Amino acid sequence: TAAKYWRVGDTSANRARAVYAWYGDFAEKLNHYPSFSWRNWQPNWYGDLTPILAVKERLQCRPFAWFLRRFKAVYEDGGLLPSSVFMLREERSRRCLRFDGYAGTSSSGAGTASLASCDRDDDHRLYWHLGNRDRFSGRCCSGLRAWNTDQCLQAAESGKAKTGVCDISGRNKLQEWAVSPATGKLHNRGQCISVEQSHILSHECGFHETQSRWTKVSSFIPLETELYRKAQEEQPEVFKSVERHLEGSAKAFCDTAVGGCLRLYRKGFGNACLDKEATFIEDECACALFVLESKTLRLVGDALLCLTLAAGDAADMWALGDC
């Protein structure tokens, strides 16, 4: 379908104006994106914020950190607020995996990564972090994401690693790559990524004479996570209000759900109930809520996760997985 309008004005300035007006301290993150950072030599290059800030003040809008917590299933569980970022170093070559694209979203939806020197600790394209929800726990993480991009490691072919748009729900099994702390294997369900004569290749784990060992190096806490933790420390009342909001949303849902919501208790063990990690605990305040839909128990607050028996089908071993 053809566009019905013409683009008018400076779109980068429009985006920056929205960020500086609404994101608070998190606006500092724009410095990690060259399409914005190169313009910072000119003060207020994005224009006058006075009208937007007046609306923000009049409406008594909550801070951006509240929004991040309100949608924790995306930002925390999806790996967008990583506990650390790190380089991935291949030990034989002593070179690191570097994303070949730019910061921001990919115009094509795909990308590549190659080996490069690990010496440039100021090169953000050398950094990766854990991303995407784990399909079974619903929490972070199950993949590897190139920092400040929308790209996750997905395959290796033609001498390079391949990336694709991160599926933060964790449903894309092609993105379930991880580094084993014990063996150093960069693996995904039996497939490993190794380096041979500077070429990145994929092979069956254990069946390659030059299988690589990978190490996470030069790790640090990224700016976005530092800002988020700072907000939690300095504005505890904000996070208390969002927790009440989340609890209220769950109650409202249960009031309208057919049959209401359920708590699941372990028979013969007093008040032991399942929590949001599918673990039996004694704290009734932390009991998870479930709703029965078509003979399936869904976790309230996360419609993508359903209760299943864990490995071995033991009656007291449960897990949360894809519905």
Image (spheres, rainbow, N blue to C red):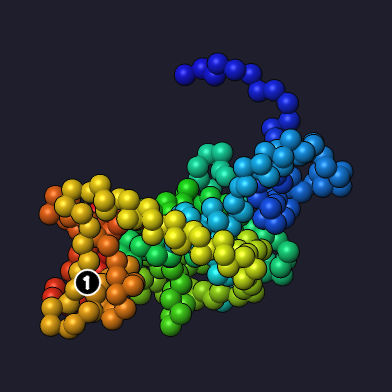
Numbered disc total = 1
In the displayed structure image, the side of residue 44 where residue 234 appears, left or right: left
In the displayed structure image, the side of residue 167 where residue 298 appears, left or right: left
What residue is disc 1 on?
318
Q: Nearer the viewer, residue 112 or 132?
A: 132
- Residue 174 location, quadrant: bottom left
- The answer to whether residue 97 is visible is no
Q: Position of residue 72 (x, y in %)?
A: 46, 58
* SS state under label 1: strand
* Image quadrant where one finds the C terminus: bottom left
- Residue 228 location, quadrant: bottom right
Q: Position of residue 104 (x, y in %)?
A: 61, 47
- Vertical side of 24 occupied by 265: above or below: below
Q: Residues within 10 Å of mark 1 (few under 14, many from 20)?
A: some
What residue type is disc 1 on?
Trp
In the displayed structure image, the side of residue 235 where residue 249 appears, left or right: left
Q: Residue at x 20, y 58 (%)?
A: 297
Q: Residue at x 67, y 38 (%)?
A: 55
Q: Residue at x 83, y 42 (%)?
A: 44
- The answer to whether residue 217 is visible is yes
Q: Position of residue 109 (x, y in %)?
A: 50, 42
In the displayed structure image, the side of residue 316 where residue 100 appears, left or right: right
Q: Residue at x 73, y 26 (%)?
A: 9
Q: Nearer the viewer, residue 265 or 74?
A: 265
